[in-house]
Amino acid sequence: MNYQLIQEVLQLVEKFDLNNTNGGYTEDINGFKRWISDHEKKEDSYSIEPNWEGKAEGRSPESVISTLLVHLNRYAKTYSRSAIQDSEFSTQEDFIYLINLKAFGAMTKMELIKKNIQDKPTGMQIINRLIKNGWVTQSDSETDKRSKVIEISPEGLQSLDAQMGKIRLATQIVSGDLSHSEKMQLIRLLNKLDDFHHPIFSQQIDSHELLQKVNATYFTD
């Protein structure tokens, strides 16, 4: 008996069970076969190089990726603006900062700014606006008296909760018509890009030197 084959089949069944949480396939042999067939088709589609505008003229895949990320950021901002229309929020950063404080708890101002990948002047403007609106409170840090610890206030929670339905809807729309497996693949790829760029961003390299230093560190043999 081929025990290796049996083990591989069992692993495949386990993967089917984990990926079928939304009930897209019947939990029987027919559903299992359909899932295998669809899975194979998706694997084949990922191995085929896509077409893009300007490809025939020599436009690079890196150029396409950069452009599409810019476009997606603009789409996301458009939906976010719609989500806070007629609300107390003036910018999407306001509720993003509050969401982070609600999710991760109290933190210093600089920790919150870094978590949102922004420069200090812009981040401080947002935090000061939140303080002015009474959505966050601040206190002295127990470990560093020079720093202020901020946390979301009851008023901030109330304002955030009042808008969360629209905010969740906006995030769902940004994901478009991607399937669950496509979302998981996209998360893996975006996390990989974030893991690459975040340490570079954290160094706060001067703009005049940024491209040259990153190129010399990561792309020069």
Image (cartoon, rainbow, N blue to C red):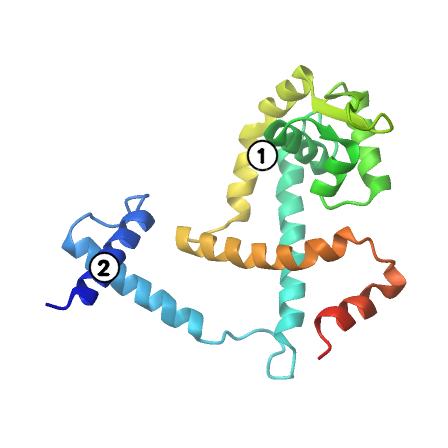
**Circle nearer the N terminus (2, 1):** 2
Q: Amino acid at mark 2?
A: Arg
Asked if residue 83 is positioned above or below residue 203 in the image, the reply reads above
Q: Nearer the viewer, residue 102 or 199?
A: 199
- Residue placed at 78% from the left, 72% from the top? 216
How packed mark 1 is, by other alpha carbons closer than 10 Å (few <14, some 14-19, many 20 or more), is many
Residue sticking out furthest to the front:
143
Where the C terminus falls, by quadrant?
bottom right
Residue 158: x and y in percent read 62, 18
Asked if residue 52 is positioned above or below residue 91 in the image, the reply reads below
- Residue placed at 76% from the left, 18% from the top? 134
* Mark 1, secondary structure of its residue: helix
- Residue placed at 75% from the left, 25% from the top? 150
Residue 195: x and y in percent read 63, 56
- Residue placed at 84% from the left, 57% from the top? 205
* Mark 2, secondary structure of its residue: helix
Closer to the observer: label 2 or label 1?
2
Circle number at residue 123 = none
| Occupied quadrant, residue 6 | bottom left
Residue 86: x and y in percent read 67, 27
Circle number at residue 34 = 2
| Occupied quadrant, residue 126 | top right
| Occupied quadrant, residue 57 | bottom right
Q: Which residue is mark 1?
A: 167
Residue 203: x and y in percent read 79, 54
Residue 161 in the figure: left or right of residue 5:
right
Spatial distance from mark 2 to mark 1, Cα to Cα?
35 Å
Residue sticking out furthest to the left:
1
How many labels were placed on the picture?
2
Q: Amino acid at mark 1?
A: Ile
